[in-house]
Amino acid sequence: MTTRQSCLILALLALGGAAVDAQARPDSTARDSAQAVEALRVRAAYAPRVIGSAAAVTIAPDAMPGAVVAPSMSEVMRRLPFVYIRQNSRGENEISVRGSESRQAAVLFEGVPLSLTWDARADVSAIPLTGAQSVDYVRGLSSLLAGPNAIGGVVSARLWEQHDAFRAPARVTRADLQIDQFGAARTALTAGGALKHSATSTLQARVGAGWRDTPGMVRPGSLDEAGTTDALRLNTDNRSLDAFAGLRYEHAQGRYLSGFVSMLDGERGVAPEMHVASPRLWRNPEVNRRIGAISAGTGAIRSRLGIGDAELSVGLTEGTIAINSYGDRTYSSVTGTERGEDRTLSLRGTFDQQLGERFVLRGSFTDAQVRYLETVNTNPTATYRQRLTSLASELDYRPMDRLTLTAGLSQDAATTTEAGGRTPLGRKSGLGWRGGATWLLPQRGLRLHASLSERKRFPALRELYSGALNRFEPNPALRPETARSGEVGASFVRGLMDVQVVAFTQQIDDAVVRITLPSTQFQRVNRDRFKSTGVELTAGTMLWGASLRGDLTLQRARIEDATISDPTQRMPEDVPERFGSLFLTAPLFAGLEGEARARFIGATQCSNPSSPSLSEQSGAEALDLGLTRRWSASRAWRAIRATLQMDNVFDRAMYDKCGLPQMGRTLRLGLTIG
């Protein structure tokens, strides 16, 4: 055991002593009150919603049972229903919603678009959520106002929590510490509250930091791996430090001025694929990200037309990722290097204006300037530039009190002005439209919604020009995708039970897919169309103090193209036809709360450099168990919580992609103060 591990365990024991001392003090909280609070906590951590006539889920990262300390966005979203998170062979974590490709989902952090980059997608494993108050995840296209390229869902993380403007925000101080049986350590500190509060205004601040040091990912016991006999997967260590700070002034009438900065510095290994003879042998010696934004809002402004408001934000994201390629599994000899510096400056504005009693007009504009500097081996640095813009407007009409109809139009464009010395594509543009309806029947606890939409997605600079250290053949001739989506759903809430059912369909013309060339390189090409249809179901209830929630996704996705003769190539990569989970939390004895989460995923298809045909990866099931104990504490610290969590109890091999299994059996011990 290393000195660092010993210190961490001693710290846990010392804090555990404080917990025992707190337990000895009488708890003035009534038993029935504690159960009511806990029920609300469990339900709030995972709440199905409808946003803009599209199905959505809201989650509070800090309240999630079984969550890891200092989580990344990918670790939070792996516990969400209906979303498929997969680690790719570059070590990145991708989002797939309703069979969509990861570049079709928009990701925002406090309004800053993180997916408008060189790669047109956000690596959610490199987005820290330390201190984030909530994460909204809209599976369909709830609005055209989210900006360009948003055709496959919107993920939005929020740093600031909504509160009554006439009350001071609650002061929060929290410390977390967690270790596992292999010496992985994670810790986080967050603090926040009102610096100044009066009857008319509030000035509040939030600060925090998170640290992770993981020696590797546990390999499921049934698998052997070339190059190692250790219990941990080869080259899967991960170290990172993140920090954030935010300041917000808010007037009681809604006017506000807000700013924040967030950073992450780290390094990580990239797991080699286990199903190919010559996988990528990569490491990322540098993974850095900076996010910052300033935003302002007018609050409610009354005019002859009605009440309206406007918001404006300027955001900057910068990221650096370095790649070292190695000649063998000892990772001792570097055979190639690549360094990329990504920067996006974005300007976003939104407004909404009431027009009489029945109409509300909403609009937005987004302008994102993307610059990427790429240095491969000793070659000169290549510069790429792309500008993405969107202008959108939607009109809400309420013909009756409980019915809302929505119609909208957008004009989106992508202009490539610099292409690393090659001929740039110039400007591509396209119109988008959307219609939706939401009908609320409160006396029956029922909400019905439906929507239809069409929008384009423009290929990313990386899709067009990147060779990925000779793994890909670039294709600057890629055409924009056109997505046509629809959904219809019903949500029912009655007492302590809720149910949501959603049926969806999606067709993407000129779909961008990956193929294997005779040279064994990959290439992205356009296919005639991609189609997916399916059903999403979630339900939750409270029984005898226990909380039970389940979710199920059934989907069928196919690629259609006149040039495809191999039937296996009509199956999209890494799209399971079924997956879901069942989650239970219940009070046990002596103040303990137990939790169990069963999850499963169906078979998927994936490409193999040694064959033009796709290979099948079988599905699997896994079970996670946990125990939690809480104690009341002093005024300085509201509560103390200890957790014991075992993930993948039966040590099953469950795959993100072919040859890339999720972690095997892992035991985690954690302590939270505050």
Image (cartoon, rainbow, N blue to C red):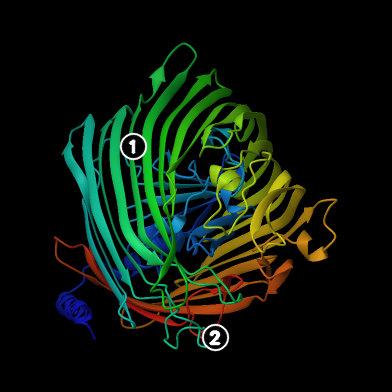
Of the 4 image quadrants, the one containing the N terminus is bottom left
- Disc number placed over residue 504 in the picture, else none: none
User: Which image quarter: residue 483?
Assistant: top right
At a point 65% along the width and 67% down the height, the residue shown is 609
Q: Are marks 2 and 1 in contact (CB under 8 Å)?
A: no
Q: Secondary structure at mark 1?
A: strand
Residue 666 locus on image (x, y percent): 41, 80
Q: Pointer 1: residues within 10 angstroms few (<14), some, or many (20+)?
A: many
Residue at the (44%, 49%) spot, across then down:
379
Comparing 227 with 83, the one in front is 227
Instruction: Using the numbered discs, state the Cα–Cα distance from disc 2 to disc 1 in whole angstroms.
Output: 45 Å
Give the labeled residue for mark 1: 293
* Image quadrant occupied by the C terminus: bottom left
For badge 2, the amino acid type reads: Leu
Q: Is residue 418 left or right of residue 482?
A: left
Residue 566: tell me if it is visible: yes
123 relative to 120, above or below: below
Task: Tell which of 365 and 266 is nearer to you.
Answer: 266
The location of residue 74, given as percent across then percent down, is 46, 60
Whether residue 99 appears in this view of the structure is: no
Q: Is residue 463 left or right of residue 156?
A: right
- 649 vs 451: above or below: below
Which circle, 2 or 1, is nearer the viewer?
A: 2
Q: Position of residue 388 (x, y in %)?
A: 53, 32
* Left or right of 507 on screen, residue 275: left
Pick out the residue farthest to the top.
304
Q: Which amino acid type is marked by label 1?
A: Ala
Q: What residue sits right under mark 2 in the picture?
A: 223
Residue 643 location, quadrant: bottom left
The residue at the point 52 percent across, 48 percent down is 121
